[in-house]
Amino acid sequence: MKVLGPKASLKDCYEVYKTLKSGWWTKGPKVAELEERFAKFVGKKYAVAVDSCTSALTLALRVHEVRGEVVTTPMTFASTALAPMYCGLKVRFSDIDPDNLCLDPKKLRIRPNTGAVIVVHSHGNQADIAGIRSKFKGLIIEDNAHCGGMAAEDGVCEGDIQCWSFQSVKVWPAGDGGMITTDDYEIYKKLKPMTWCGIKETTWDRETGKGYNWDYVIDSLGYKCYMNDIIATLVLSKMDRIEKMNQRRRDIAFYYDTHLDIDPCDLPACSGTYQYYTIKTEYRDQVADKLREAGISTSVHFKPLSEHPFFKRCIIDPLPVTDRVWKQLLTLPIFDGMTNRQVRYVVKKFNEIVG
């Protein structure tokens, strides 16, 4: 039996087909609809759709004109640290909490030149933003790439600005794409033209408004990183069932929790999305090899950025927890389309191996 990953639904395919037939593929009515609905969905006033969470993080830093250094976690994908570098900023890693794999406020060291902290809700686990805020009064950017379907009441919108992802392996997958959310109208006004080369009004706005549809004004620096209508259609297609998708992940996680032959201390923290179901085991590589032989795909989330040569420059403070914990991490398959038979198969094979 192969246990690999999710696929698009027939509804997703049909909605994309309708958008393709409409003739409007770029930033248009579907993007506008998604921005309005997404802001309401997560409990924020404004949303700006972009082509990736990487772009969202980069624009969040640029729109706030951050200076100095940015502190973030090494337990994340490269984009979290690359975005500050794209802005000419230095990055400094801070150590993690061994249970939720997020930044540990107790380990956080703020320096006079710290301009922002990027908090990652790793694996969909809620980071302690209140604890971080008690030590740092400046800009807190939330990397919510693992939090698709969660909202303000879930505790993942407590920072100053949020960056979301719809990349293909996320809990709200659309191939790619990202979103920025904020309650600050002035920041929102600056962000909109930044996604489209500094142009204030989109082609769709001009097409449906008054005046000449070819006429526009550029009065600020911008980038080409807007979302297109094809991606927006995929995100919208899943919006009405994202909670059902996440509930399926939680159900699978509960089955794993109660049936895997593993110490409860090595099970993952409770998550709102279970972006990843990541256990701890001293025999990670051996278990992964045996599961692969059984047709079960596993992964490691994450090999810390501090382990990569390029990011060694970001290690200023010691990272003892990160250095120890990551070597034990193994992510088991979890996705909303996973069948009960597949879940039982994973448990059966895992227990045979560790037994």
Image (cartoon, grey):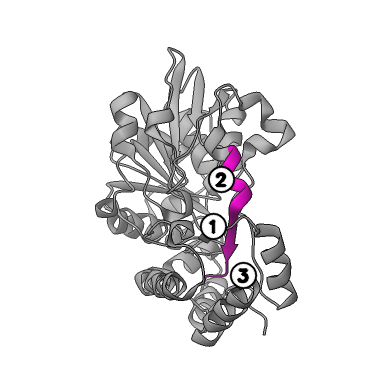
Quarter holding the C terminus is bottom right
- Residue at 43% over, 55% down: 124
From the viewer's side, name the closer residue of 324 and 68: 324
**C-beta proximity under 8 Å, tags 1 and 3:** no
From the viewer's side, name the closer residue of 311 and 345: 345
Kind of element beneath mark 1: loop
Task: Using the rendered view, name the quadrant where residue 149 is placed.
Answer: bottom left
Q: Image height check: is 187 above or below 153?
A: above
Tell me which segment is drawn in magenta.
323-335
Quarter holding the N terminus is bottom right
Label 2 environment density (alpha carbons within 10 Å; few <14, some 14–19, many ≥20) = some
Q: Which residue is mark 1?
A: 228
- Residue 317's x, y, as percent? 55, 23
Kind of element beneath mark 2: helix
328 part of magenta stretch:
yes
Q: In the figure, is residue 311 to the left or right of 105? A: right
Kind of element beneath mark 3: helix
> Amino acid under label 2?
Val
Q: Which residue is mark 3?
A: 354
Q: Is residue 168 visible?
A: no
- Residue 137's x, y, as percent? 31, 23
> Amino acid under label 1?
Asn
Distance in Å between CA atoms under marks 1 and 3: 46 Å
The mark lying in front, picked from 3 and 2, is 3
Which residue is most to the bottom? Answer: 341
Task: Using the rendered view, name the quadrant where residue 207 is placed.
Answer: bottom left
The mark lying in front, picked from 1 and 2, is 2
Q: In the figure, is residue 272 to the left or right of 215? A: left
First in residue order: circle 3 vs circle 2: 2
